[in-house]
Image (cartoon, rainbow, N blue to C red):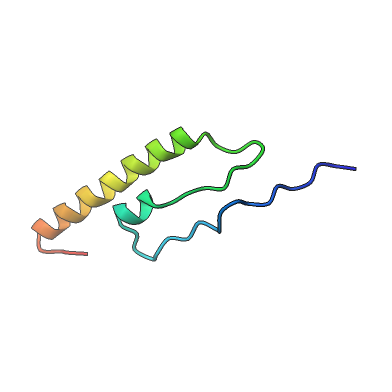
Amino acid sequence: MGLVEPVPSLPPVLLPARPTASDIGKVRFAVGLRGYRADQVDEVLGVLGGEIERLRAELATRGQGV
């Protein structure tokens, strides 16, 4: 008998069509046998969320709000 596929402990990761930093900050990934390290994923999501907000603010100051 082989290994049983783990049942995800969280629902699928879904983001809106135009995610904000807040949306990214709420993302949680299911834990798998050989999954990603949560601290690394959280760090990358934090950087991405910050960059999205920075770019949105830059566009807003140029009158090209998103």
Q: Residue at x 32, y 40 (%)?
A: 47
Question: 44 or 63, which lies in front?
Answer: 44
Judged from this view, the residue extending furthest toward the right is 1
Tell me if 62 is positioned left or right of 4 in this view: left
Q: Residue at x 50, y 56 (%)?
A: 13
Q: Quadrant of residue 60?
A: bottom left
Question: 7 or 46, which lies in front?
Answer: 7
Judged from this view, the residue extending furthest toward the front is 9
The C terminus lies in quadrant: bottom left
Question: 40 or 66, which lies in front?
Answer: 40
Q: Residue at x 55, y 58 (%)?
A: 12
Look at the picture and state if 2 lies above or below 64. above
Q: Quadrant of residue 23?
A: bottom left
Question: 38 or 55, which lies in front?
Answer: 38
Image coordinates of residue 65 in percent, x first then y, are 17, 64
Image coordinates of residue 22 in percent, x first then y, are 31, 54
Tell me if 32 is positioned left or right of 1 in this view: left
Tell me if 56 is positioned left or right of 5 in this view: left
The N terminus lies in quadrant: top right
Q: Quadrant of residue 16?
A: bottom left
Image coordinates of residue 55 in percent, x first then y, are 21, 51
